[in-house]
Image (cartoon, rainbow, N blue to C red):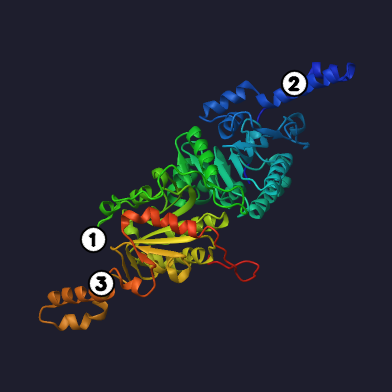
Amino acid sequence: MTIVETRPYAEAPDTEAAFLRAVEPDMTSRLIELRRLQQRAQDGPSERATQAQHDRGKLTVRERLELLFDPGTFREIEQLRRHQAVGFGLEDKRPPTDGVVIGWGMVHGRKVFTYAHDFRIFGGSLGEAHAAKIHKVLDLALAAGAPIVALSDGAGARIQEGVTALAGYGGIFRRNVEASGVIPQISVMLGPCAGGATYSPALTDFVFMVRDISQMYITGPDVVQTVTGESITHDELGGALVHTSRSGAGGFLYDSEEECLEDVRYLISLLPANNLEPSPVEECSDPIDRECPELADIVPAQANQAYDVKNVIESIVDDGDFFEFHQLWAPNIVCGLARVGGRVVGVVANQPMQLSGVLDIPSSEKGARFVQMCDAFNIPLLTLVDVPGFLPGGDQEHNGIIRRGAKLLYAYCAATVPRVQVILRKAYGGAYIVMDSRSIGCDVSFAWPTNEIAVMGAEAAVNVIFRKEISKHADPEGHREGRIAEYKGELMHPYYAAERGLVDEIIDPAHTRERVIDAFNMLESKRKFTAPRKHGNPPL
């Protein structure tokens, strides 16, 4: 629990409104009083508090809402709510909104709910009334089947209100879990988020962060230094760059609030309103039958040469527009949303530019989370495969690559959305199986003529199979090269998997876009029935 100092807020006596209530209780006086109260809530506590917010490099809550919603569409509720707490001077400081603005509006013409902390009031800290407002809007979003966006800028629990603040967090967490996989939940970190409050963004689907102003941590720098002796700054401990590149707790990083909120709006346009709606489809101006001859030049035929798989993705998808998730974390796997033929799909691809595209612990967890999100919201999956295997090493084994790598396998096996796989080059061992192979339920599998599907690379296989034979040969190196060529010719030629029904078709890379779109169109009405159960028990 974070100790929050009460922000100064002296309630100025509204003598004119009091006079109107007492002397002229007619409609005109009531409307004058109402407008004054509404304007006061809109303006916030004081010009000084607003200037202090700007001096921190942050926008006010009203400025943020104007950026998030289509002009003139935001409808606020419970604007005049005040806390009822007494003690520690709280009874003399009862500002309207209680430090959080809730309501709904339109984003690109689609209904979206929000709650947004106002750091100018009690530091955006959470008390009983504050929590009740958040509970209200979360319940409304779930009932209406529409996305919820949390604009987070609060310093934690309002300690003056005691344990009721903690109970308020519990109500938020429970509702986050109830809404999980039902409506999209987006957390936008625009200030501090400490202690138990950090678990709400952790429970949501997407977390946006802004350099220099976003922070998340369970215990702050002062506590860390007291307990461990380590001296660390707020940004070093839980800044935006830390969480988007190291911990994986943040998914998107921006230099300004304006850029951040613009991409929040764009993400909403790519998502269905809830889990009962299909993946969004819009008219496509990029020709469906557009050939991609550049793909043959982007991807070298030699399996040991690197390339940027993002260039492959941008060539295939509509207008080259790809919205990447977790760009800085686990970069050896690329995940994001794009449109193909006007339909939103989730793209998962190995990245040969990073660690040769191997799967490791972070990339497995990143991929698993993304696949589960797509499956929850009926977004088809396109998997581009060029994987040499799982990363070997003691660190990986000791840190749980078996159970944590299994998360990606579990996510793909459990997914019921349309699934299309394209094998670009190498697909070795268990990593090939995990990357949505036919054996775990991929609906359609394509492969390029450069594909190499095998238990392992030819060099490694020969070293295992013919180790003794090579060591005894008069020309070990020459004999080894001959065996490698033999192994490749018999077990790793491009048509080996196709001959055994492990891929559906070998295609010209230039036709990839057209074939992928055709496959997704065919799978549009896919239905998959699973055995009744309470829920699965995925690996930790």
The local secondary structure at tag 1 comes to loop
Any part of residue 186 in sight: yes
Instruction: Inspect the image, locate mark 2, and give the three-letter code of the amino acid beneath it.
Output: Arg
Asked if labels 2 and 1 touch by Cβ distance under 8 angstroms, the answer is no
- Give the foreground label among 3 and 2: 3
Q: Who comes first in sequence, dot 1 or dot 2? A: 2
Q: Is residue 399 above or below residue 56?
A: below
Residue count near mark 3 (Cα–Cα under 10 Å), binned few <14, some 14–19, many ≥20: many
Residue count near mark 2 (Cα–Cα under 10 Å), binned few <14, some 14–19, many ≥20: some
As drawn, the label of residue 36 is 2
In the image: residue 390, left or right of residue 260:
left
Q: Who comes first in sequence, dot 3 or dot 2? A: 2
Mark 3 lies on residue: 458
In the image: residue 304, left or right of residue 440:
left
Mark 1 lies on residue: 302
Residue in the image at 19% along x and 77% along y: 483
Residue 187: name its quadrant. top right
The local secondary structure at tag 3 comes to helix
Disc 1 from disc 2: Cα separation = 72 Å
In the image: residue 407, left or right of residue 79:
left
- Give the foreground label among 1 and 2: 1
